[in-house]
Image (spheres, rainbow, N blue to C red):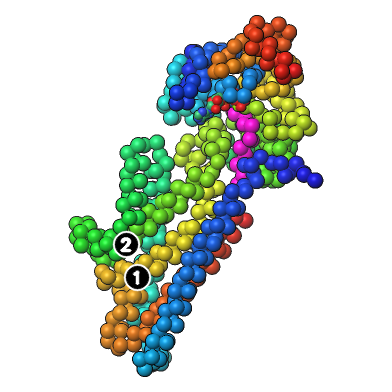
Amino acid sequence: MESPRDRRPPDSRRPSRDAGRSRWWNAAWLDVLQFTVFVAGLLGLAVSGAIGMGYNWQWYRVPEYLVRIVEGELLWGPLAHGLLVTLELTGWSVLVTLAIGLAAALLRLSDSFSGRIVAKVYVEAVRSTPLLIQVYLFYFVLGPILGLDRFWVGVLALSIFEGAFAGEVIRAGILSVRRGQWEAGASLGLSRRQLYRSVVLPQAVPLMLPPLTGIVISLVRNSAIVSVIAVFDLTTEARNIIAETFLSFEIWITVAAIYLAFTVALSVAANRLEHHVRA
Amino acid sequence: MIELDGVSKWFGAFQVLRDVRLRVAEGERIVICGPSGSGKSTLIRCINRLEEHQEGRVVFAGRELGADAAGLTEVRREIGMVFQEFNLFPHLTVLENCMLGPVRVLGMTPADARERAMEFLVRVRIPEQAGKHPAQLSGGQQQRAAIARSLCMRPRVMLFDEPTSALDPVMIKEVLDVMNDLAQSGMTMIVVTHEMGFARTVADRVAFMDEGSIVECLPPDRFFTNPADERTKRFLSQIL
Ligand SMILES: Nc1ncnc2c1ncn2[C@@H]1O[C@H](COP(=O)(O)OP(=O)(O)OP(=O)(O)O)[C@@H](O)[C@H]1O
Ligand SMILES: [Mg+2]
């Protein structure tokens, strides 16, 4: 029998929210899965190739590039330093990406015609040029003009790239809040700012979290691209080590495993956060 | 208190409101009825400017509604609105729904706002639901919570857009009882509804709308027994 609860207006039943959530969910895990399959494929290829060409495996030499113990003291190796730089790079980039994304989303949803155009052109331009080209553009053109060092050029290039995607995610989240919610808030006399803060974002943010996790994971992966401007991140350190030692298989496999561990850890953390926000 | 003077509105090429004139005095209760699509919702939404009109003037308490955003929030806090779909904030409890406006807009302390919210939740007879989220309430309870939320702003006017159309008969009565109480307390009310029993007993005047115009606006005894216009007669014969 149908209870009154089942006949609540669509507003409170939130069917679309749950449907949307499970879809985004898969997207975040799909990202990790793709990466895992990719790494596994690479591994398989490497092993079979190595056997074929009689590669001389020297795994015992790898740990010293992560961490060494000299006279009872712990010394971090270049890979650990690289990881730290990658962490720092992505950490800052996440913050700037969210700021840019929020600004782009609000601009696109604003009443200002020119604001909407600017935001739209930004999103389209960023999405239709390769990240590598954007990094070069920042490094050779904007960096010198703004007087930024490599690290911040990297942060800015990554954030502007991912900010376009984050902007779309945030915009979609905001648009998913029903019109009646805006109207109810407005009829109480809330200003636009208060509406966003007290009514719209609290409902939209839980929806945004899973796709934003996907963006953070893609930030981690794309942070490797800034190694082309010689920021001493994980990928750059790996290349330097290989140039000296020719341990290419061992080091690349190790580096891939580190990225993988990082992104999986992020997914798990985001998953926790999401449950926390929904509760 | 409210004056609509020659208000016209178009959605694209389609004219929804045609030269609407209506004056509502303080304490007066107006019921608006009419066929679907005649522009009833659009009309009352023009009063707190959820819709913008293109011609004519909408004046509330001596202030004309225009594009000025600051003045608009000033006016809106004095006009309560109740929607067909309730539109409670699903992420907040009933109590928090009622406290949001007083705290954010009126700048009350949470303690004062809580006290006021409980006072109005008692008035709409759901104090025991205060700690629940809207999704845990029946439709009738949700609509009464929405009424309490509006009343917590101590508005000078209450607008209702088909407040009972999404409800079962039992719940309709719960909501109408609350609206009756409100009318008894002297609140100025503009109510779009097809509850003709409510119109008969509570309204000072009943307006009939058709194709964007107010065809006639009469006291209920005359409206129900002796309407002037053919269209009103036809509508009444269908609905009664
Ligand atoms: N945002 C909009 N854009 C275009 N047309 C609209 C919009 N809102 C309403 N209309 C049209 O304006 C007309 C009047 O709508 P309105 O909602 O005011 O009617 P109503 O009298 O409240 O009807 P109902 O009894 O169905 O609620 C309808 O024909 C509707 O299709
Ligand atoms: Mg309507």
Residue stretch in magenta: B79-91
The numbered mark at residue A131 is 2
Q: Is residue A41 left or right of residue A122?
A: right
Q: Is residue B175 left or right of residue A53?
A: right
Q: Quadrant of the N terminus of chain B?
A: top right
The numbered mark at residue A224 is 1
1 and 2 marks on the same chain: yes
Percent position of residue A199, x then y = 54, 43
Q: Nearer the viewer, mark 1 or mark 2?
A: 2
**Mark 1 is on which residue type?**
Ala
Q: Earlier in the sequence, mark 1 or mark 2?
A: 2
Pointers 1 and 2 in contact (CB under 8 A)? no
Percent position of residue A103, x then y = 38, 48
Which quadrant does ligand 2 occupy? top right
Q: From this viewpoint, which residue is outermost toward the right?
A: A1
Q: Does residue B193 lie above or below A50 as drawn?
A: above
- Distance of mark 1 from mark 2, alpha carbons? 11 Å
Check the residue under mark 2 and report the chain it is in.
Answer: A
Instruction: Decide whether the magenta segment is chiefly helix, strand or loop.
Output: loop
Is the residue at mark 1 in contact range of ligand 1, meaning its CB lies under 8 Å from it?
no
Q: Does residue A98 lie above or below A56 as drawn?
A: above
Percent position of residue A166, x then y = 42, 54
Q: Which quadrant of the view contains residue A10?
A: top right
**Residue at point 52% right, 23% down?**
B46
**Residue at point 77% right, 31% down?**
B169
Nearer the observer, A95 or B98: A95
Whether the magenta-drawn stretch holds residue B194 is answered as no
Decide if residue B205 is in sight here. no
**Mark 2 is on which residue type?**
Leu
- The local secondary structure at tag 1 comes to helix
**Residue at point 68% right, 13% down?**
B234
> How many residues crowd mark 1 within 10 Å: few (<14), some (14–19), many (20+)?
some
